[in-house]
Amino acid sequence: MTSHNVRVGLLAYGAIGHEHNLAVQHTAGLELTAVCDTNPERIAAAQQLAPSAVAFSDASSMLNSGSLDLVVISTPPNSHYQWAKDALLKDVHVVLEKPMALTVDECDELMSLAAERDKLLVVYQNRRYDPDFVTMKRLIGDGAIGEVFQYDSFVGGYSEPCTYWHSNAEVSGGAIFDWGSHYIDQILDVIHDPIEHVSGLNQKRRWMHATNADHAQVSITFASGKQATFVNSDLAAARKPKFYVLGTEGAIVGDWNPAAEPAVADLPALLTIYREGGAQEDVTLDEVAPHAFHASLSNHLHKEMPMPVTALQSRNVVGIMQAAEESARQNGRPIIPALRLS
């Protein structure tokens, strides 16, 4: 348990680093004391919010400085494992961006190291706190549509992908890993049944300048017979709803908000409950406290309160995505994912 402000360092400062900086500034018990980036303009942007933060251009120097209690790692996914390992070996708590790593073996090694060092290892699963998902999860938990047996989620549209690392499968892990780190985490936060098998498909049809799939699909079949799917597409001229959830007493559909075109993922979905006989009910979204993840982080380190997001949950998301990629290499053959219960 920590009595002083938790000294936070940011490793890489892009848009998500700025999001973390804002959250730290508004969360009691956290203090930004260091920021590392190779771009001086990004360092300057960070110091506009945190003038006293010490600037570093070398990550190892920041981790070796002795001035950190916790580091937020926002580097590309293929570097998450090594930077998290380096930080834990310096006895620094670790918050990772999604995904935790690109293999379950890497995740397991990090979790074991964190346990040995008695350090926090957690992934910033920020989409758990999206108002549309929070509202839908509450409705499902309240039994608004009975027992959920089919859960479909989708992100994308028809557009040329960027040339940044998000579109490079070697760096990002591929299209399944890129958005799946969010959406598969949401699925597992709603359906807790044991998983029977996973299948995946990657379509490469149009955008040859990028190595990510143009269209990727994951299907999760649970031992109970329930099923969930996730699709990430750059070839969907007609978008599917963000959420399409069927229950024994109704359905919830989350339609993309046209006010955000073309970047529809920037706004929460418009939720509608459908009931027997065709009745429809538009849903007012729940209010979500800002910076809720960072508040839980502070409460955990200062008061030993449990984190709502755990390393095990994020590790199992990687297990499902890894199985889906293996399935895709075998044209969709079902794969039993390497999951852990504890």
Image: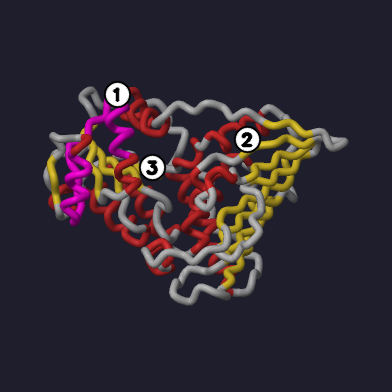
Query: Is residue 23 rendered magenta in the image?
Result: yes
**Would residue 4 be found to the left or right of residue 245 on screen?**
left
Numbered tag placed on residue 28 in the rendering: 1
The residue that appears at 40% across and 69% down in the rendered structure is 170
Q: For the residue labelled by badge 3, is the local secondary structure a helix, a strand or a loop?
A: strand
**Mark closest to the chain's N terminus, 1 or 2:** 1
Q: Residues within 10 Å of mark 3 (few under 14, many from 20)?
A: many
Q: Quick one: 184 or 327, which is closer to the camera?
A: 184
Q: Position of residue 162 (x, y in %)?
A: 42, 64
Which amino acid type is shown beneath numbered disc 2? Met
| Residue contact at pointers 1 and 2, CB within 8 angstroms | no
Q: Is residue 190 above or below residue 304?
A: below
Which amino acid type is shown beneath numbered disc 1? Ala
**Would residue 268 be found to the left or right of residue 195 on screen?**
left
Q: Quick one: 290 or 280, which is closer to the camera?
A: 280
Numbered tag placed on residue 337 in the rendering: none
Q: For the residue labelled by badge 1, is the local secondary structure a helix, a strand or a loop?
A: loop
The residue that appears at 62% across and 50% down in the rendered structure is 153
Numbered tag placed on residue 122 in the rendering: 3
Cα–Cα gap, marks 1 and 2: 29 Å
Q: Position of residue 179 (x, y in %)?
A: 50, 54
Q: Quick one: 273 or 147, which is closer to the camera?
A: 273
Span shown in magenta? 20-47
Numbered tag placed on residue 136 in the rendering: 2
Q: Residues within 10 Å of mark 1 (few under 14, many from 20)?
A: some
Tell me, what colour scheme is on the image?
secondary structure
Cα–Cα gap, marks 3 and 1: 19 Å
